Image: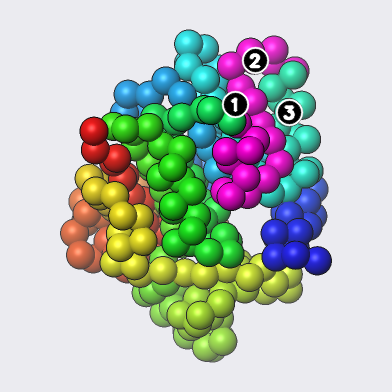
Amino acid sequence: MSYYDKVGTYYDKDAVDFEQRYHQNPALQRIRQSFRQHTKSYEQTTVLEVGFGPGFDLVHFAEQFPDRKFYGIDISAEMVRLTQDKIDQMGLKNAWVAKGSVEDIKALFPAVQFDMIYVFFGALNTVNDLKGAFADLREVLSSGGRMVLTFVNKYYIGGTLIELLKLKPKFAFARWKKVWGGYSPTNFLASRCYRPGQIKKLAQLECTYSRGYSIFYPAWYYHKFHRFIPKSMLHLLWRLDERIARTPIGKWGEYMLYTFEKKN
């Protein structure tokens, strides 16, 4: 199997109960809403989502903004099917999805230039060649267009400390390695985590905004912790993260979000 065939198979399996797990995870929902709000803050007419999963965001945006065009690619055939079903059921006429990787964008959507490209929850951590992926994205990004991209951080200090306290050093430093196996302890997904400086260098575009997530607020995959933390405390931790997200401390969070702009 090719690299992308393996990634696609991983997410085909993940699609089985993906939506159920999402709706049971308030931390994941809260972070996604923040991603959405930031993406909506920019002007846009022709939009591309890379790695749309079961289509939560693409369908949400297409329904909310019927005057805009939304395109999406995902490496998983099952995720494409789930999203296409939503598009058909909702009768959306401004949304199109296809199976493929970043390298396939021009072939899948020929002659389309995008003024917004977004990636939520680190889909670009699984591309085979990030430098090449950025080159492909720049090529289909229109002049003056923007990319809102999220990446799993290489150094998530909170997660490292938690895993060390759980006496699991293997997991504590897993993403520090050249190849990371993803979030699942049993299902390996070849991924790569990057430092903020690496991302900005590879993008070769002006970074106009960046911030961290889950610095003190527990990461979405530690959602079991949320059951034992009072809601008022979780709210305070979220507010604390918002205050320091754009400082150097934010770079030690679980995720980083960047806005890159292609100047006229």
Residue in view at x 28 percent, y 32 percent: 144
Between the residue at mark 2 and the residue at mark 3, the CA separation in whole angstroms equals 10 Å
Considering only vertical position in the picture, is 182 above or below 208?
below
Disc assigned to residue 127: none
User: Is label 2 in contact with label 1 (beta carbons under 8 Å)?
Assistant: yes
What percent of the width, then of the height, locates residue 174? 53, 80
Name the element at disc 3: helix
- Is residue 94 rendered magenta in the image? yes
Lateral position of residue 108 relative to residue 258, left or right: right
- Is residue 179 rendered magenta in the image? no
Between discs 3 and 1, the one toward the N terminus: 1
Write down the region rendered in magenta. 89-109
In the image, which is nearer the foreground, mark 3 or mark 1?
Answer: 3
User: Is label 3 in contact with label 1 (beta carbons under 8 Å)?
Assistant: no
Name the element at disc 2: loop
Between the residue at mark 2 and the residue at mark 1, the CA separation in whole angstroms equals 8 Å
Between discs 2 and 3, the one toward the N terminus: 3
Instruction: Report the residue marked by disc 2.
Output: 92
What percent of the width, then of the height, locates residue 172? 49, 81
